[in-house]
Image (cartoon, rainbow, N blue to C red):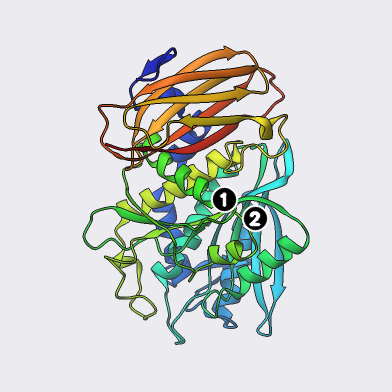
């Protein structure tokens, strides 16, 4: 157990954020499925007062432009600010729905997916690749628009991913050249296929910026909010989708997707890629994982701490010994008075212990984790600080703990 602190076994409700719970409760699988039907031509869309059908979203086609206009209307209906970025020789266009932060509007967290598709044919539904991700972005925009967040949240739809991530590369390069403060980018690409019904999803990550911490956050979110996925963390993750554009510019990013290695969708890039092949309960869970991770980041629990929040960068923590055969000492130095929560997560991402100590004063503190009865492996220790100053943002730090035997 964690010594000298109030202890409770997981799951522990104090670790959950009520606003994230509200977001998850508002997610509707029938809403996402209907977005997929509209993006794949199974249902008509209404743009500029006229009904029309999206038969393909391949770059440069009328359906590609229609999908752009359809999504733009949805963002506007949800009250989001809308921006776009034109690029390339084929009139590619990225679409951004922007929910401006109330405290740190210049600092950004993002959820994105590509809306273009293959194959090159008159009818190309592209349901899994990638109406599934695009519909999830639209659903997130719908749900998040009913909330406020200290950080700016951007819902992004990329064009010309199938030609080599062209749209997201254009945006990431623009962001880097203009020094945009993107704290976390979450990519969703192919979310609907789960033929063996094992509900295993991939998280693709590489050790770039704070991407490992963001992946760890997603693993913990699955446990904290009881989403119910089995997670396969792939490191080094694949670079064949838009998150790689952000890695290439040094940004923190992960990709959340269906399992590619052991259960790949055989209808990928064919005209048979339809909603009929979706495992809808799995689709809902993967989308909720992305939304909850985005929500945790948008509420101030970002992968990089809390940006410009007072004294966030001066919080330090160490673990001794590490690797450890049994007893572990968790030491930390508080730059301000705060309530401190410490949680331990096992290698599967399940919270196995958590504790909270209210109103700790500035200075050095330590606690003991009696880990002798836990199996060997790589665990994660998370510190969560809620400052006593109500104007200060929360701070989070995650570090690995290796148990050896």
Task: Identify which residue is drawn at 49% across, 46% down.
Answer: 291
Secondary element at tag 1: helix
The quarter of the rendered structure image containing the C terminus is top left
Say left or right for 146 vs 212.
right
* Earlier-in-chain disc, 2 versus 1: 2
Estimate how packed mark 2 is, as few (under 14), some (14 to 19) or many (20 or more) residues with alpha carbons within 10 Å: many
Number of marks in the rendered image: 2
Residue beneath disc 1: 141
Front residue of 120 and 4: 4
Estimate how packed mark 1 is, as few (under 14), some (14 to 19) or many (20 or more) residues with alpha carbons within 10 Å: many
Task: Identify which residue is drawn at 43% across, 70% down.
Answer: 129
Return the x and y of residue 248 as percentages of the image width and height: 61, 66
Return the x and y of residue 270 as percentages of the image width and height: 36, 81
Task: Identify which residue is drawn at 73% across, 29% down.
Answer: 310
Residue furthest out toward the bottom: 121
Return the x and y of residue 368 as percentages of the image width and height: 41, 20
Task: Identify which residue is drawn at 42% across, 73% down.
Answer: 126
Residue 360 higher or lower than 305, as above or below: above
Q: Is residue 151 visible?
A: yes
Residue 94 appears in which quarter of the rendering? bottom right
Residue 348 higher or lower than 382, as above or below: below
Return the x and y of residue 283 as percentages of the image width and height: 36, 55
Q: Is residue 50 visible?
A: no
Residue beneath disc 2: 97
| Whether label 2 touches label 1, CB < 8 Å | yes
Q: How far apart are the two marked residues, 2 and 1, measured between alpha carbons?
A: 8 Å
Say left or right for 125 vs 299.
left
């Amino acid at each position: 157990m964690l010594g000298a602190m109030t202890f409770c076994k997981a799951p522990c409700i104090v670790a959950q954020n009520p606003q994230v719970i509200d977001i998850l409760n508002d997610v509707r699988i029938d809403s996402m499925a209907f977005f997929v039907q509209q993006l794949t031509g199974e249902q008509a869309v209404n743009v500029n007062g006229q009904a029309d059908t999206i038969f393909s979203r391949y770059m440069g086609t009328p359906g590609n432009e229609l999908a752009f206009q359809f999504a733009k209307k949805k963002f506007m209906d949800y009250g989001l600010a809308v921006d776009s970025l034109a690029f390339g020789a084929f009139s590619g266009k990225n679409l951004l729905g922007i929910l401006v932060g109330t405290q740190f509007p210049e600092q950004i967290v993002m959820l994105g997916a590509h809306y273009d598709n293959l194959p090159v044919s008159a009818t190309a539904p592209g349901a899994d690749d990638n109406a599934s991700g695009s519909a999830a972005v639209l659903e997130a925009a719908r749900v998040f628009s009913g909330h406020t967040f200290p950080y700016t949240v951007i819902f992004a739809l990329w064009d010309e991913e199938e030609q080599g991530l062209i749209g997201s590369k254009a945006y990431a390069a623009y962001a880097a050249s203009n020094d945009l403060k993107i704290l976390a980018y979450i990519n969703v690409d192919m979310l609907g296929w789960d033929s063996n019904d094992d509900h295993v999803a991939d998280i693709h990550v590489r050790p770039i910026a704070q991407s490992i911490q963001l992946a760890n956050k997603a693993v913990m979110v699955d446990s904290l909010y009881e989403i119910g996925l089995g997670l396969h963390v792939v490191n080094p993750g694949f670079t064949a989708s838009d998150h790689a554009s952000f890695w290439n510019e040094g940004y923190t990013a992960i990709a959340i997707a269906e399992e590619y290695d052991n259960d790949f969708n055989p209808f990928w890039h064919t005209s048979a890629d339809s909603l009929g092949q979706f495992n809808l309960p799995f689709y809902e869970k993967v989308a909720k994982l992305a939304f909850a991770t985005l929500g945790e980041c948008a509420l101030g629990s970002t992968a990089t701490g809390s940006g410009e929040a007072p004294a966030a960068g001066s919080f330090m923590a160490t673990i001794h010994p590490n690797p450890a055969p049994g007893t572990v000492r968790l030491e930390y130095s508080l730059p301000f008075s705060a309530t401190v929560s410490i949680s331990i997560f096992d290698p599967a991402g399940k919270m196995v212990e958590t504790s909270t100590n209210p109103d700790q004063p500035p200075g050095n503190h330590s606690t003991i984790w009696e880990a002798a009865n836990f199996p060997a492996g790589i665990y994660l220790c998370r510190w969560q600080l809620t400052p006593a100053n109500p104007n200060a943002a929360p701070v989070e730090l995650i570090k690995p703990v290796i148990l050896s035997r």
